[in-house]
Image (cartoon, rainbow, N blue to C red):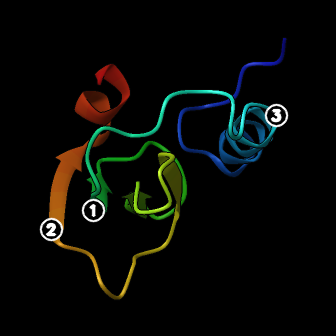
């Protein structure tokens, strides 16, 4: 299995493939949440990644970019985001 840096374009592509493969096969997300994330100190690109997590569909989805209707925005450094 190929390894890609956490949150890199390649990592996000592979994560989306896995999410699509298992869509509808897991338990529904226990809480509805729309959260924007600002990840700082990223060791590639311009050093910051804007991403979001959204469970309003019943499944947890993560993607790049921000939601217009997020309930909260969290800023976190890359090492902590990766550890979580």
Q: Which mark is residue 21?
A: 3
Quarter of the image for residue 63 reads bottom right
How far from the left and from the top, in percent, is residue 46? Answer: 46, 64
Circles 2 and 1 in contact, beta carbons < 8 Å: yes
Q: Which mark is residue 35?
A: 1
- Identify the residue shown where x is 76% and y is 47%: 13
How far from the left and from the top, in percent, is residue 45? Answer: 54, 58
How far from the left and from the top, in percent, is residue 16? Answer: 72, 45
- Identify the residue shown where x is 23% and y is 30%: 80
Q: Circle 2 is placed at which residue position? A: 72
> First in sequence: mark 2 or mark 1?
1
Quarter of the image for residue 1 reads top right
- Of 30 and 38, the residue lying toward us: 30
**Quadrant including the C terminus:** top left
- Of 82 and 33, the residue lying toward us: 33
In three-dimensional space, the C-alpha distance between marks 2 and 3, rounded to whole angstroms, equals 28 Å
Q: Which mark is residue 54?
A: none
Residue farthest to the top, as pictured? 1
- Identify the residue shown where x is 19% and y is 47%: 76
> Mark 2 falls on what kind of element?
strand
- Of 51 and 2, the residue lying toward us: 51
> First in sequence: mark 3 or mark 1?
3
Left or right: residue 76 compared with residue 29: left
- Of 27 and 62, the residue lying toward us: 27
């Amino acid at each position: 299995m190929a390894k890609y840096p956490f949150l890199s374009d390649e990592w996000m592509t592979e994560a989306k493939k896995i999410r699509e493969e298992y869509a509808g096969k897991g338990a529904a997300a226990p809480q509805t949440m729309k959260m924007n994330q600002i990840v700082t100190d990223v060791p590639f690109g311009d050093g910051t990644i804007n991403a979001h997590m959204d469970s309003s569909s019943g499944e947890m989805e993560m993607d790049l970019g921000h939601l217009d209707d997020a309930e909260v925005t969290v800023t976190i450094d890359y090492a902590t985001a990766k550890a979580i």
